[in-house]
Amino acid sequence: MAQRTFQMGYETAHGEIKEALKNTDEIEIIVTGRTSGRKTSRPVWFAVDGDTLCLLPVTGSDTEWFKNMLHNPTITLVANGITWTTKARPILDPAAVRGVVEKFRAKYGAANIRKYYSKLDVAVEVPLA
């Protein structure tokens, strides 16, 4: 599959990105290191809520990619050959974080969330539109 790259904000990109997300359970996130300035990537699970992509850091606020995103909120995401760069926003409100956790439990199963996620104190939202 050919690689397609988008900057968020284009309507055609929006549709292609949402379609790419429908066909996978895992995406790649690329962040800039807060001290090194180097790009690093890792696979992450996600949930979609309308026009928002939700991410849940595995070790919560202790997760390195989350700390990097706080320092530089511009992130790149890759799903099924579609790459897009956008701004991410932390979710710090406990009730909002619980909502994201529930979306992850519904998608991946409560047992998997218990198994892989050790701290559920923060989440991240990424606008898809």
Image (cartoon, rainbow, N blue to C red):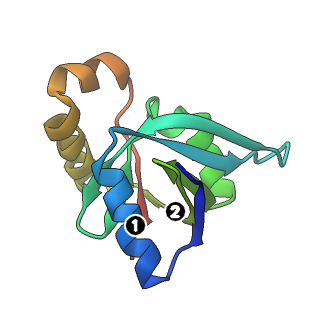
Vertical arrangement, residue 41 with respect to residue 73, above or below: above
Local crowd size for mark 2, using a 10 Å CA cut-off: few (<14), some (14–19), many (≥20): many
Residue at position x 28%, y 52% from top?
A: 22
Residue 48 x, y percent position in the rendering? 28, 56
- Residue drawn at the location 83% of the way across and 49% of the way down: 37
Q: Which mark is residue 80?
A: none
Q: Residues within 10 Å of mark 1 (few under 14, many from 20)?
A: some
Closer-to-camera residue (21/68): 21
User: In the rendered image, which residue does mark 1 sit on?
Assistant: 16
Q: Amino acid at mark 1?
A: Glu
Where's the C terminus, which quadrant?
Answer: bottom left
Q: Which three-letter amino acid code belongs to the residue tagged 2?
A: Ala
Mark toward the viewer: 2 or 1 = 1
Label 2, on which residue? 88
| 55 sits left or right of 40 in the view | left
Dot 1 lies on which element?
A: helix
The image shows residue 63 at horizontal and vertical percentages of: 55, 34
Determine whether 62 is above or below 66 in the image.
above
